[in-house]
Amino acid sequence: MIKKVLVANRGEIAVRIIRACREMGIETVAVYSQADEEALHTQLADEAICIGPASSSESYLNMEQIISATLVSGADAIHPGFGFLSENSKFVELCEKCNITFIGPSSEVIQKMGNKAQARSTMIEAGVPVIPGSKEAVRDVSHGAEIAEEIGYPVMIKAALGGGGKGMRVAETRETFAASFQTAQKEAQMAFGDGTMYLERFVRNPRHIEFQILADCYGNVIHLGERDCSIQRNHQKMIEESPSVVIDEELRSRMGQAAVQAAKAAGYTNAGTIEFLLERDGQFYFMEMNTRIQVEHPVTEWVTGIDLIQEQIRIASGLPLSYRQEDIKLSGHAIECRINAENPDKNFRPSPGTITDLYLPGGKGVRIDTAIYSGYTVPAYYDSMLAKLIVHADTREQAISKMRTALGEVIIEGIDTNIDYQYEIMNHPDYQSGKIDIEFISKWQR
């Protein structure tokens, strides 16, 4: 069994991992940048090691520093959380060479599934439904234009090694293709250091549905139901819920089987997420696989009763899954709102600064995952997410009501947040009736 975990992350996910380890009797090591010296995760861990200046590239993305901190501290495992190095196959390869247990899949699997073109090929071979698109990587605009004609317009242009909505553009017609491709490719090169692209048919107004999977080292793979992540802005999720209001048992079974099939085809181990686009007629397509724990994992934890972080650690320790597929029952409804330091009225401008007053709600069915506290200074160097507010109730209607109540109680003074914006979404009649898709935010007139 793993005895000591270095948490290669910051913020609420670092706190979440530290708490899970503490419950399991596992020691923890926090790493932090100079900007995070007073961060909560550094105070909660058994040890804390500074790994560099504020810039992510010199601290949380500095592979050598993190490996050195692991070796110096005597930690036998690294949990990467999400973001930063969590899906970096080179980092995982370093861990493997240094005999450090990486709490996640192998470097080979991360590399295979992180390349979207290669992931598509793997899914096609496994018989998992995929969106019609390019069968190989696309590196120049003329080759891309030829493939776009074969697929048919509109087409989605995506970075092969991308994520987080970067390096993505929709070309509605052949006349706009070249400009869209070049813009997406330039953005991909800047964000990921690689301008390799791929194309797929643009699915108009789908829902974004993802399935949580768990896989151990003995070939056992299960799914834990779906999360509906359709409320998103610029391809960044804002609100997630489980289960989805449009998925019945028959569709859940088909999509879940496809998710398990996808994980097996990839040779996957640990926790992961298979993401699908779902059309109104019930047709679904594989979009990508996230080879890490997700920001929105708490909604799955609440409807299944399974601690996903602890299960990750058990799997990485070489233990078999604690559950079989027939053990998984979805109970009630859970919703998560991401509370960010940003101003929606000023084009979501980030709002770093010092929190001068703070009150967070509680009560039955209310969960807060956060690392903020009164007097904490939100740095300008990292993601703007401050907290995740998650609620659980017997029905979706009750969960929405509980979320409205909880959002109404949150007080974060000293910086701007998107709390009021989230509250307005909860009150929107289309959200309340479940008539949502990934274009909800772009079509919404406040």
Image (cartoon, rainbow, N blue to C red):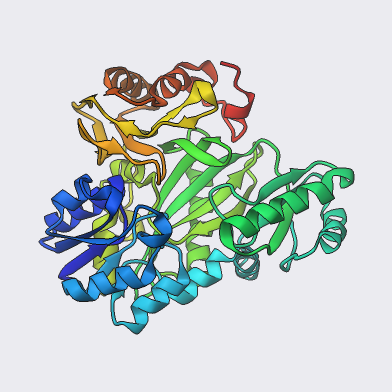
Could you tell me which residue is drawn at 64 percent across and 24 percent down?
A: 443
- Residue 126 occupies quadrant: bottom right
Where's the C terminus, which quadrant? top right
Tell me: 201 left or right of 29.
right
Question: Horizontal and vertical percent for residue 6?
Answer: 23, 65
Where's the N terminus, which quadrant? bottom left
- Residue 82 occupies quadrant: bottom left
Tell me: 188 left or right of 319.
right
Tell me: 11 left or right of 188.
left
Could you tell me which residue is drawn at 35 percent across and 26 percent down?
A: 415
Where is 321 relative to 432, above or below? below
Tell me: 359 left or right of 91.
left
- Residue 113 occupies quadrant: bottom right
Question: Horizontal and vertical percent for residue 428?
Answer: 50, 17
Q: Please tell me how many numbered marks the rendered image carries.
A: 0
Can you see residue 43?
Answer: yes
Can you see residue 131?
Answer: no
Question: Horizontal and vertical percent for residue 349?
Answer: 49, 30
Question: Horizontal and vertical percent for residue 111?
Answer: 52, 71
Closest to the observer: 196 or 264?
196
Where is 130 relative to 228, above or below? below
